[in-house]
Image: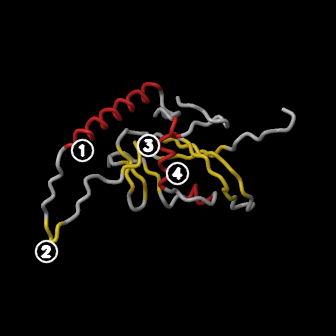
């Protein structure tokens, strides 16, 4: 796995692509798929994109690819930015990070593109200045992502260890 910073967590820049809740075999298979996709996209980028469609004489700007923000931890396909969610490009896969997310709303946060990218890259994200609905207190936490047996995103909240004086 990557290099840990002083609080014991791995930064996304140092992360090697392994997802903590997957087995070594699943991580190896995902690494193989990522390498294969990288090879395909390198090949496809060299090809010209034919777009000579016109509408009332005006050229139509057709995007070559959707806004890919990461790889699906369930099936290895691309996660793309859509109107309501960051979801898997494989329509048979149920994995999605919903933008209108009740879990994140409960701690006073939104599912942003940056948070979604960090969750997909590292499997965890560090959130500062969260707010408890119940008490109104602010806190810092880590949110880990896993997938249930049906391939839907599940979130787990963890709190950093507090440093105690004299230890």
Q: Secondary structure at mark 4?
A: helix
Query: Mark 2, residues whose alpha carbon is within 10 Å: few (<14), some, or many (≥20)?
Result: few
Q: Give the left or right position of residue 160, taking residue 150 as reference.
A: right
Percent position of residue 134, x then y = 72, 61
The answer for how far apart the CA atoms under marks 3 and 4 are is 23 Å
Dot label at residue 118: none
Q: Considering only order in the chain, which callout, 2 or 4, is on the residue closer to the N terminus? A: 2
Q: Is residue 96 left or right of residue 57?
A: right
25 relative to 112, above or below: above
Residues packed near mark 3 inside 10 Å, few (<14), some (14 to 19) or many (20 plus):
few
Residue assigned mark 4:
115
Residue at figure coordinates x 46%, y 39% from the top left:
149
Please name the residue shown 30% across and 37% down the image.
37
In front: label 2 or label 3: 2
Where is residue 72 drawn, in percent x and y? 40, 42
Circle 1 or circle 4, nearest the eye: 1
Q: Which residue is more in the foreground, 81 or 87? A: 81
The residue to which callout 2 is attached is 56
Task: Specify the label residue 45 is tagged with.
Answer: 1
Q: Is residue 96 left or right of residue 55?
A: right
**Distance between the Cα atoms at labels 2 and 3?**
46 Å
* Mark sitting earlier along the chain (2/3): 2
In the picture of the structure, the residue carrying the numbered disc 3 is 150
Q: Quadrant of residue 164?
A: top right
Task: Choose between 93 and 36: the one closer to the eye.
Answer: 36
| Extreme-bottom residue of the structure | 56
């Amino acid at each position: 796995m990557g290099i840990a910073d002083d609080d014991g967590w791995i930064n996304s820049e140092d992360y090697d692509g392994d997802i903590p809740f997957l087995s070594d075999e699943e991580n190896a298979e995902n690494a193989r798929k990522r390498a294969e996709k990288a090879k395909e996209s390198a090949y496809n980028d060299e090809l010209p994109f034919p777009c000579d469609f016109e509408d009332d004489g005006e050229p139509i700007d057709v995007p070559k690819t959707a806004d890919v923000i990461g790889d699906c931890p369930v099936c290895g396909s691309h996660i793309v930015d859509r109107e309501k969610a960051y979801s898997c490009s494989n329509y048979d896969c149920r994995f999605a990070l919903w933008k209108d997310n009740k879990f994140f709303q409960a701690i006073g946060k939104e599912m942003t593109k940056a948070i979604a990218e960090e969750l997909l890259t590292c499997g965890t994200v560090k959130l500062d200045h969260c707010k408890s609905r119940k008490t109104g207190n602010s806190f810092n936490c880590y949110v880990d992502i896993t997938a249930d047996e049906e391939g839907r995103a599940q979130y787990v909240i963890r709190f950093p260890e507090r440093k105690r004086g004299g230890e």
